[in-house]
Image (spheres, rainbow, N blue to C red):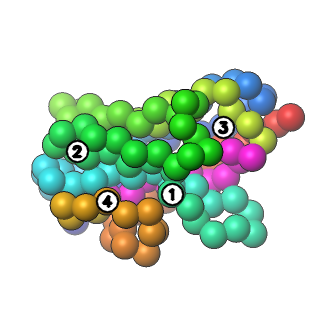
Protein backbone atom coordinates (compact mmCIF):
# COMPACT_ATOMS: atom_id res chain seq x y z
CA UNK A 1 0.00 0.00 0.00
CA UNK A 2 1.33 3.41 -0.97
CA UNK A 3 2.17 5.71 1.92
CA UNK A 4 3.01 9.37 1.46
CA UNK A 5 4.24 11.67 4.24
CA UNK A 6 4.68 15.40 3.65
CA UNK A 7 6.98 17.64 5.68
CA UNK A 8 8.40 21.12 5.35
CA UNK A 9 5.41 23.41 5.66
CA UNK A 10 5.40 26.51 7.83
CA UNK A 11 4.94 30.25 8.06
CA UNK A 12 6.94 32.45 5.72
CA UNK A 13 6.81 36.08 4.64
CA UNK A 14 5.86 37.04 1.11
CA UNK A 15 8.86 36.71 -1.18
CA UNK A 16 10.34 33.93 0.91
CA UNK A 17 10.98 30.27 0.14
CA UNK A 18 10.04 26.86 1.48
CA UNK A 19 10.88 23.32 0.40
CA UNK A 20 8.29 20.62 0.87
CA UNK A 21 9.25 16.95 0.97
CA UNK A 22 7.13 13.88 0.35
CA UNK A 23 8.52 10.55 1.56
CA UNK A 24 6.98 7.72 -0.44
CA UNK A 25 6.90 4.07 0.61
CA UNK A 26 5.03 0.83 0.16
CA UNK A 27 6.07 -0.20 -3.32
CA UNK A 28 8.20 0.62 -6.33
CA UNK A 29 7.12 3.86 -7.98
CA UNK A 30 8.41 3.04 -11.42
CA UNK A 31 5.76 4.17 -13.88
CA UNK A 32 4.09 6.48 -11.39
CA UNK A 33 3.33 10.16 -11.61
CA UNK A 34 3.91 12.02 -8.34
CA UNK A 35 2.04 15.25 -7.77
CA UNK A 36 1.58 18.20 -5.48
CA UNK A 37 -1.86 19.68 -4.92
CA UNK A 38 -3.08 22.41 -2.59
CA UNK A 39 -6.31 23.41 -0.92
CA UNK A 40 -6.99 26.85 0.48
CA UNK A 41 -9.81 27.47 2.99
CA UNK A 42 -13.17 27.46 1.27
CA UNK A 43 -11.70 26.40 -2.06
CA UNK A 44 -11.43 23.15 -3.96
CA UNK A 45 -8.22 21.16 -4.06
CA UNK A 46 -6.16 22.22 -7.06
CA UNK A 47 -3.25 20.83 -9.05
CA UNK A 48 0.14 22.46 -8.51
CA UNK A 49 2.82 20.31 -10.15
CA UNK A 50 3.64 16.78 -11.21
CA UNK A 51 6.71 14.73 -12.08
CA UNK A 52 7.19 11.40 -13.77
CA UNK A 53 9.00 9.09 -11.39
CA UNK A 54 10.80 7.24 -14.15
CA UNK A 55 11.71 9.94 -16.66
CA UNK A 56 11.49 13.13 -14.63
CA UNK A 57 9.08 14.93 -16.95
CA UNK A 58 7.43 17.86 -15.15
CA UNK A 59 4.29 19.95 -15.52
CA UNK A 60 3.05 22.97 -13.56
CA UNK A 61 -0.06 25.01 -13.16
CA UNK A 62 0.38 28.46 -14.70
CA UNK A 63 0.26 30.37 -11.41
CA UNK A 64 3.44 28.70 -10.09
CA UNK A 65 5.54 28.45 -13.26
CA UNK A 66 8.91 30.09 -12.75
CA UNK A 67 8.51 30.09 -8.96
CA UNK A 68 8.04 26.43 -7.97
CA UNK A 69 10.18 23.45 -8.93
CA UNK A 70 9.20 19.82 -8.48
CA UNK A 71 11.92 17.19 -8.31
CA UNK A 72 12.47 13.66 -7.08
CA UNK A 73 15.26 11.61 -5.58
CA UNK A 74 14.64 8.01 -6.60
CA UNK A 75 17.30 6.70 -4.22
CA UNK A 76 15.54 8.30 -1.26
CA UNK A 77 12.01 7.69 -2.59
CA UNK A 78 11.28 11.35 -1.98
CA UNK A 79 9.59 14.06 -4.01
CA UNK A 80 10.28 17.74 -3.39
CA UNK A 81 8.52 21.00 -4.10
CA UNK A 82 10.84 24.00 -3.96
CA UNK A 83 8.72 27.12 -3.60
CA UNK A 84 10.32 30.51 -4.20
CA UNK A 85 8.90 34.05 -4.38
CA UNK A 86 5.96 32.94 -2.29
CA UNK A 87 2.79 35.03 -2.30
CA UNK A 88 -0.10 35.22 0.18
CA UNK A 89 -2.25 33.48 -2.47
CA UNK A 90 -0.01 30.42 -2.10
CA UNK A 91 -1.36 29.89 1.42
CA UNK A 92 -2.95 26.45 1.57
CA UNK A 93 -2.59 22.90 2.79
CA UNK A 94 -0.24 21.18 0.37
CA UNK A 95 -0.77 17.50 -0.42
CA UNK A 96 1.46 14.94 -2.08
CA UNK A 97 -0.26 12.42 -4.36
CA UNK A 98 0.65 9.37 -6.43
CA UNK A 99 -0.90 7.98 -9.61
CA UNK A 100 0.03 4.75 -11.36
CA UNK A 101 -0.84 5.60 -14.94
CA UNK A 102 0.82 6.40 -18.25
CA UNK A 103 -0.87 9.79 -18.23
CA UNK A 104 -0.98 12.51 -15.58
CA UNK A 105 -4.10 14.52 -14.89
CA UNK A 106 -4.98 17.80 -13.17
CA UNK A 107 -8.06 16.25 -11.56
CA UNK A 108 -7.58 15.38 -7.87
CA UNK A 109 -10.27 12.70 -8.07
CA UNK A 110 -8.08 10.68 -10.44
CA UNK A 111 -5.21 10.38 -7.98
CA UNK A 112 -5.79 7.41 -5.64
CA UNK A 113 -3.01 7.90 -3.07
CA UNK A 114 -2.62 10.95 -0.82
CA UNK A 115 -0.57 12.17 2.08
CA UNK A 116 -2.00 13.91 5.12
CA UNK A 117 -0.99 17.39 3.97
CA UNK A 118 1.25 20.13 5.31
CA UNK A 119 0.21 23.73 6.00
CA UNK A 120 1.92 26.56 4.15
CA UNK A 121 1.10 30.09 5.30
CA UNK A 122 2.49 33.14 3.51
CA UNK A 123 2.11 36.44 5.34
CA UNK A 124 1.97 39.78 3.54
Upstream in the sequence, badge 4 or badge 2? 2
Residue 124 x/y as whole percent: 86, 34
Label 4 to label 1: alpha-carbon separation: 11 Å
Image position of 85 with respect to 50: above or below: above
Crowding at mark 4 (Cα within 10 Å: few <14, some 14-19, many 20+): many
What residue does disc 2 label?
A: 53
Marker disc for residue 111? none
Q: Earlier in the sequence, mark 2 or mark 3?
A: 3
Compute the Cα span from label 2 to label 3. 26 Å
Q: Residues within 10 Å of mark 2 (few under 14, many from 20)?
A: many
Q: Secondary structure at mark 3?
A: strand
Residue lying at 46% horizontally and 32% vertically, measured from the top left? 69
- Comes first in the chain, label 1 or label 3: 3
User: What range of the chain is rendered magenta?
Assistant: 89-98
For marks 3 and 4, the one nearer the N-term is 3
Name the front one of labels 3 and 4: 4
Which secondary structure is most common in the magenta stretch? strand
Q: Is residue 118 above or below residue 41?
A: above
Is residue 23 something one can see in this rendering? no
Q: Is residue 95 left or right of residue 114?
A: right
Q: Which residue is mark 1?
A: 47
- The residue that label 3 is drawn on is 10
Q: Residue at position x 58%, y 40% from top?
A: 64
Precedes in sequence: disc 1 or disc 2: 1
Identify which residue, 63 or 13, lies in the foreground: 63
Residue of label 4: 104
State the image quarter where residue 12 is shown.
top right
Dot 4 falls on a residue whose secondary structure is loop
Q: Secondary structure at mark 1?
A: strand
How far across and how far down the image is residue 93, in percent? Answer: 62, 54
Please give the name of the residue rendered at 13% of the width and 49% of the height, measured from the top-left corner.
30
Amino acid sequence: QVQLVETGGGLVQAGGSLRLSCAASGRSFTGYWMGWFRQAPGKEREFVATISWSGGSTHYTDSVKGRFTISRDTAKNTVYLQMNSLKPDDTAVYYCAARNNYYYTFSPSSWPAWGQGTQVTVSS
